[in-house]
Image (cartoon, helix red, strand yellow):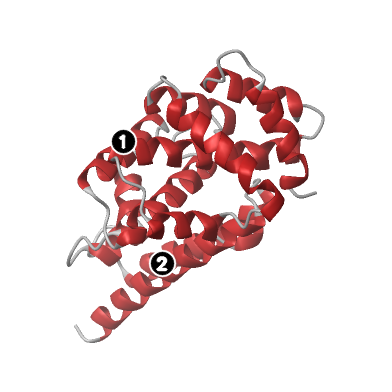
Amino acid sequence: MSIWDRFGDFITRVSSSASSGVADVVEAVRTVFSGDADLRRRVAFSVAMIALSAKMAKADGIVTQDEVRAFQEIFEVPREQTRNVARLYDLAKQDVAGFETYAERMAQLCGSGHTNCVMLEDILDGLFHIAKADGLVHEREGQFLHRIAEIFRIEEAHYQSILARHVNLGAGDPYVVLGIERGKPFEEVRKRYRKLVSDNHPDRLIARGLPQEFIKIATTRIAAINAAYEMIERGLRHA
C-alpha cells in the first residue's frame, strides 16, 4: 500500500490540531497508522524527511530550485497529494519548536534507540542529498546536519563516512567512505566493502520501511561505496 493513499487523512488529522506542533505530528503518525506497523514506519520516515528538510531550509534561509528537484527525486508525490505534502512542510517550517526538538522526536519515532541506527542514517543521507543539490553543502547546512547526527546518536567516525559520500574530503576520502583505516590489509578492505554493499542493497532498505522512491538515494550511496573501493584497489595495485 502506498503511503500516499493515507497521507491526506494524516494531514487532515495534524491540521485539525490546536497547535500543529511537532508533538501533534508525532502523535498523529502513531494514532492514524496504529493498525499497520509497516505503513507507520514508511510514513514516519517520510514525515521525518519532509519536516527536517523544512527545518533545514529555515536554518539555511534559502530554498533553491535544485533543492526542490532533489526533494522530488526522493519523493515522487502523486499530483493530488502535492498540496498535502506542502502543508506538512509549511507546518514544520512555521512551527516555533526548534529543529533539535523535531530531530529528537523523529529519532524516537523512527529510530531503534541504538547508536548508528540505520533508518536515522537513511534520513540523514536524504537530507545530505537535498543540501548538496545546488553544488555544495553550505556552512549552515553543514552545522545543521552535524547536529542532527549528534541527536540521532550517529557516532562521529560514522558521520564522517556519511559526510565523505557527499563531500570530497581529500586524499583519505575513499577510506573514510568505507569506514576503514588506511593501511589495513586489502582482504579486510574487501570484506568491509562487501558488507556495505550487502547492508545497502535496495531490498534491505525497503524492508526496513523506506519508500520505493528512496532507491534513488540507495543507488547514489552504492555508487559512492563502489567508487571508494575501486580507488583503493587501484592505489594498492600500483603501489
In the foreground, 212 or 57: 57
User: Which residue sits at x=30%, y=58%?
Assistant: 164
- Could you say which quadrant of the image residue 64 lies in? bottom left
Horizontally, residue 31 falls left or right of residue 179, namely right
Q: Which mark is residue 59?
A: 1
Q: Which mark is residue 225?
A: 2
**Residue 179 seen in the current view:** yes
User: In the image, residue 151 lies at what x, y percent?
Assistant: 38, 29
User: Which residue sits at x=19%, y=83%?
Assistant: 239
Q: Callout 2: 10 Å neighbours few (<14), some, many (20+)?
A: many
In the foreground, 157 or 237: 157
Q: Callout 1: 10 Å neighbours few (<14), some, many (20+)?
A: some
User: In the image, residue 145 lies at what x, y percent?
Assistant: 33, 41
User: In the image, residue 6 lies at what x, y percent?
Assistant: 76, 39
SS for dot 1: helix
In space, the residues marked 2 and 1 are separated at their CA atoms by 30 Å
User: Which residue sits at x=29%, y=82%?
Assistant: 234
SS for dot 2: helix
